[in-house]
Image (tube, grey):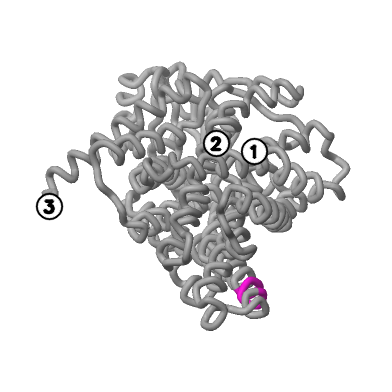
Amino acid sequence: MIGGENFLLVGAMLLLVAVFAGKVAYRFGAPALLLFLGVGMFFGYNFISFESAELAQFVGMIALCIILFSGGMDTRFSEVRPVMSAGVMLATVGVMLTAFILAGFVWLVAPLLGIELTFPFALLLAATMSSTDSASVFSILRTKKQGLRENLRPLLELESGSNDPMAYILTVLLVGVLAGNGQEGMSVGTSLFMFFVQMFVGVMLGYGFGRGTVWVINNINIANQALYSVLLLAAVFLTFSFTSLLQGNGYLAVYIAGLVVGNNRLVHKQTLTTFFDSFTWLCQVIMFLVLGLLVNVGELLQFDIIILGCLVGAFMILVARPIAVFACLAPFRNFSTKARAYISWVGLRGAVPIIFATYPVVEHIEGAELLFNIVFFVTLISMAVQGTTVSGMANALGLAYEERESSFKESIRERMTAAFTEVEVNRQMLVGGDKLSEITLPDNTLVVLICRDGDYFVPRGNAELLEGDKLLVLSDRGDELDSQYKELGIEEVLKF
């Protein structure tokens, strides 16, 4: 049995290797998550024995909650509003069309390879692969400072963030249908009813928990700022678990809650966003490592798996996804043919299909191991083929442009010599006059923001100051400013 120290050592080594592999991936324009998956496969094949689909599913559930919530927080209503209808269409109808088209192909082709599959099983296999994963896509685009025309980026972000719940519902319902061999499993009518219940409950509770989370964070007034991140993390898991308990779709609920939280005024919002960005990457790395450890490389490289996986991957990329995209976007005239083609190509599959493929394994569905291996193989193909050509395809279709890089964003805290201080206006400061211009301050010093009774505004020279106002002061004359503060009787100075 592995001791705790050895477990931590192995875990730390896996994370370090995965991070360095991600750096290599950026250099060659490949999705970093593909190499994270490869690291897990390498260690699973050579050094570590890991066979728990239940544990992998649990890790995936935790990671998906964080990833979807963080994706919702990063999505701006102002950006997605123009493409809201198209995005929702792709995330719902597009997922179902992809699943049924791909299922028909699998059902017809598998017997030619000596693999007999029922149509419900083929549909289950297709449903696990019916959603897209654009997290790695945008990591590549942002690394290359590449923008996309025709509002493609917000559209793809909206689709990738909101289509996982639809694929999850289809997968769970089909697992329920197959689990009872037609007796204890759910009927088609029951499945449709559960589908609408899960969607409705997920949306309602997601919005409700999102509004409640915003209110609590803005009014709880915790002295330790670090605890706000803990509070928001607890809200994410509470949203998921409570929604699932009431037969709603927890993944949809956490995404909706993230949208609500991210698009409302929130205290310490920058700190919370930074925390969730870092934590999301950690979850993605761990999730891909665990999924890589879970797969049996020997079974994955069997002849029938390779052939069927290649055929399914090619059909999904070249036929099923394009048909679904062009059909869903037919009512929307504001997208060019090139834009529709690019949306079709960026149907990248990632960790989500592999996680969904563990559900039949955990429920002991007949043929579940075959399904898992095919889904894993197709995901590798999608990430290797589509993931490495995301940037090149945008350039080839004339949809890319180079984004302007801010001269201040990265260096504002690291390189500038000026520093911020916060002070409170006292009576002595106002002796010479109550206008900002009448306050004596060193050269190269600016009052950039005033906080008064919870309201913030940028002052001018003739702005009237009141006792108790909070001033945010920027200066590169730190020593002179400290002396001036002492002369003005200011004892408490916050520096950051």
Q: Nearer the viewer, mark 1 or mark 3?
A: 1
Q: Position of residue 281 (x, y in %)?
A: 42, 40
Task: Give the number of callouts.
Answer: 3
Q: Which residues are magenta?
A: 192-197
In the image, is residue 346 part of the stretch drawn in magenta? no
**Is residue 269 rendered to the left or right of residue 153?**
left
Mark 2 element type: helix
**What residue is pinned by disc 3?**
1
**Which residue is identified by label 2?**
381
* Residue at x-position 70% and y-position 21%: 395
What whole-number distance in Å separates the C-alpha atoms at marks 3 and 2? 36 Å
Q: Amino acid at mark 3?
A: Met
Q: Earlier in the sequence, mark 1 or mark 2?
A: 1
Is 36 situated above or below 172? above
Main SS category, magenta section: helix
Amino acid type of the residue tagged 1 in the rendering: Ala
Crowdedness of circle 2 by 10 Å Cα count: few (<14), some, many (20+)?
many
Give percent across and percent down for residue 231. Answer: 38, 59
- Residue at disc 1, secondary structure: helix
Q: Residues within 10 Å of mark 3 (few under 14, many from 20)?
A: few
In the rendered structure, are the residues bearing label 1 and label 2 in contact, judged by CB atoms less than 8 Å apart?
Answer: yes
Which residue is rendered at x = 76% and y = 35% of the image?
341
Disc marking residue 314: 1
Looking at the image, is 252 positioned above or below residue 408? Answer: below
Q: Alpha-carbon distance for marks 1 and 2? A: 9 Å
Q: Is residue 92 above or below residue 310?
A: below
Q: Residues within 10 Å of mark 1 (few under 14, many from 20)?
A: some
